[in-house]
Amino acid sequence: MKNSDKREEIVLAALELIAEHGFHGAPMAMVADRAGVGAGTIYRYFESKDVLIAEIFSELEKKVVESLMQGYSRDGSLRERFIYLSTMIIRYFMANAIHFKFIEQYMNSPYGVSLRRERLLGKARDIDLFRHLLQEGIDGHALKDLPLPLHFALAFGPILSLLRDHILGFVELDDALIQKAVEACWDGVRRQDAPG
Amino acid sequence: MKNSDKREEIVLAALELIAEHGFHGAPMAMVADRAGVGAGTIYRYFESKDVLIAEIFSELEKKVVESLMQGYSRDGSLRERFIYLSTMIIRYFMANAIHFKFIEQYMNSPYGVSLRRERLLGKARDIDLFRHLLQEGIDGHALKDLPLPLHFALAFGPILSLLRDHILGFVELDDALIQKAVEACWDGVRRQDAPG
Amino acid sequence: MKNSDKREEIVLAALELIAEHGFHGAPMAMVADRAGVGAGTIYRYFESKDVLIAEIFSELEKKVVESLMQGYSRDGSLRERFIYLSTMIIRYFMANAIHFKFIEQYMNSPYGVSLRRERLLGKARDIDLFRHLLQEGIDGHALKDLPLPLHFALAFGPILSLLRDHILGFVELDDALIQKAVEACWDGVRRQDAPG
Amino acid sequence: MKNSDKREEIVLAALELIAEHGFHGAPMAMVADRAGVGAGTIYRYFESKDVLIAEIFSELEKKVVESLMQGYSRDGSLRERFIYLSTMIIRYFMANAIHFKFIEQYMNSPYGVSLRRERLLGKARDIDLFRHLLQEGIDGHALKDLPLPLHFALAFGPILSLLRDHILGFVELDDALIQKAVEACWDGVRRQDAPG
DNA sequence: CATGAATGAGGTTTCATTCAT
DNA sequence: TATGAATGAAACCTCATTCAT
């Protein structure tokens, strides 16, 4: 096994176990076992369990953003870009359910909460593609006259719920359904007196 | 202290600690301490920590439903009832942030997931006030032609996100804002070619 | 076993193991074993291994002081009191070799060093019977004109060395020998131009 | 780096780390790091950590003896030689505090104790310059009529204490003070009825 | 019934040593 | 010969649960 392979194995093992069983269902020994390495080996790559978790989150985040950026064009109309991004997010997490589960676990943990605090209040960061989009819509009066966080909730909330449901097997999402769901989200945020 | 008082103290202590610090930030000894009872005493009322947690969730659920039922009239228009229920849910959890936090913790734990699985797929239960409402809207073509779980996601997703943000201090929700948010949710689920 | 007995058993077990094998030859599991209690039990009485060690030291210190105070009279001449105290210290540690070994271990550890720093520089404390004695001798010109720490070294250094040797079996100390040794220490600190 | 350089680097690194942080504050990896060699390399020069430590001690011992021998003349009076040796020891360790700290660590560890047992009881060895001196004094009735170990304690005990205090910063030793201290030691061991 | 001291399995982390490169 | 990544035993500590009082 190559050097970097080992790191990757550890990340993957931890990702899976945490996604499936939560932080406390993923003891380091179990992670090591599944990764096929010794328990101590993990600590050559990650200072502590906390750091391992944070690192995984950070990597996932990067992957998501990269995936969203692919094929994203700043040229389309607001609506088009909204639909595109929302759709891509759903597609990405449908294809990577484990990532979704991990992120949810993370966001519900002390780490995640403080992160969210920094992130949402703080200055712009990578993800903020979406944020910029919404802000542009607010400023341009295409979107309802609501604070940004509300738009976030209106746009993202349904997506999160949808993904949860899909991953739990409550709905079978296909392209048509995704399309409709995303358009419904658009209906939620857009000014109703503006054209569709 | 009366018997039932003791039980209640235990439930309250566990509720607070878990809401604030998560399941693993709430050792039984700490729960006992805060409840003002002996550690062993908890086990006279609840078979195990898991059972205690499940019981708390069950009680919260009941309270929420009761609260929603109060003042709910089946006579209003679909829109009115939708707005009413949504508003009430937001108000309830704003007034009982601890309940919201606990439920989130619970829903993100193994218990919660399996519960959700039973609940949402399974036979109708209490919460289903909302479900019935949505189903009625679907059947009557007032709502978009989407599967029920999608409507759930469209209606509930934003509410959950909003409450999270509010509790974390990202938004200051007042009545006007709640009103707007709920109406935006309605815009999301209603047929856009039907009247407002 | 009574409640307080358990605490005492733990202290005794730790004391013996640390005295004999040093801090790292006394893992908590071994302490628990020898004390006849569960590993977790130790933590009901002591917050951590560090605290356990500090507590043991503190108890030993108290015992030593108590032992020295017994029969100590402030009325004797400086020489008499010096001889008395020195003799008692030697006697005490000869009878409690384990205490001596523990204290040596402790004093050579990070804890002990910082303690010594506080103690010797800091304001008077209990042990300072001896310190006061020396200071009195310095002020009254019965002792050599040297800084207090030097007198400490001259008076205590030999005692420590002697006890080490005795405990390791290098010398067989009897009363006559102790007497001579202590008088030799007195010769070391006293002004040679003053009467014996 | 030459082979012997490597060995020396390792010894120096270990010496410093152990002197400063004790045996357990000096993991092999850290030693290797500071020495600028691979962790495995240490094991090409030293069978184990224990062996490394023993070797370092042995080297230090040799250096001390060499240093003491320099300028030592067998011709002076007993007193002169006693003063000379004592002074040199103090000077040496003041100039090489790290050596002193290491030796203290070593002597307080299981290795050191068994060593001391062999050494002091056993057949004569290098350090015994001092031992011979004292024996000569005993035999010639210039020193008190005490067993050799007691004289050792009387002569060495204060020196050790003094050095400890100096290194910890409790006293500022200058030449005058050293002189006085050493003379006080002499007062401790010499027959008081003999001329000063 | 109520207690809370006691338990010990199981968690995270360290580190002396080995061995493939 | 030199390396340093890998190892896993063993350290400290937590906490759900039991049971004698």
Image (cartoon, coloured by chain):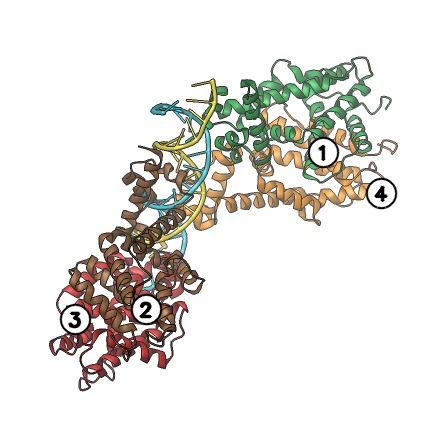
Chain colours: A orange, B green, C brown, D red, E yellow, F cyan
Could you confirm whether marks 1 and 3 are on the same chain?
A: no
At x 24%, y 67%, the residue is D58
**Helix, strand or loop at mark 4:** loop
Is residue C76 at least partly visible in the picture?
yes
Q: Residues within 10 Å of mark 3 (few under 14, many from 20)?
A: few
Residue C62 horizontal/vertical position (percent)? 35, 51
Please say if D169 is above or below A178.
Answer: below
The answer to whether the residues at label 3 and label 2 have Cβ atoms under 8 Å apart is no
Q: Position of residue A102 (x, y in %)?
A: 56, 36
Q: Which residue is mark 1?
A: B162
Task: Name the side, left or right, on which B172 lies relative to D29.
Answer: right
| Residue underneath mark 3 | D125
| Disc 1 residue type (three-letter) | Leu
The residue carrying pointer 2 sits among few (fewer than 14), some (14 to 19) or many (20 or more) residues within 10 Å by Cα, namely many
Chain of residue at mark 4: A
Q: Are marks 4 and 3 on the same chain?
A: no
Q: Specify the subunit that label 2 lies on.
A: C
Looking at the image, is mark 1 or mark 2 nearer the viewer?
Answer: 2
Query: According to the image, label 2 marks what residue?
Result: C153
Measure the C-alpha gap from mark 4 to mark 1: 23 Å
**Residue shown at 29%/71% (left/top)?**
D159
> Label 4: which residue?
A140
Q: Position of residue D18 (x, y in %)?
A: 35, 62
Amino acid on which disc 3 is placed: Arg
Left or right, residue B142 beside residue F13: right
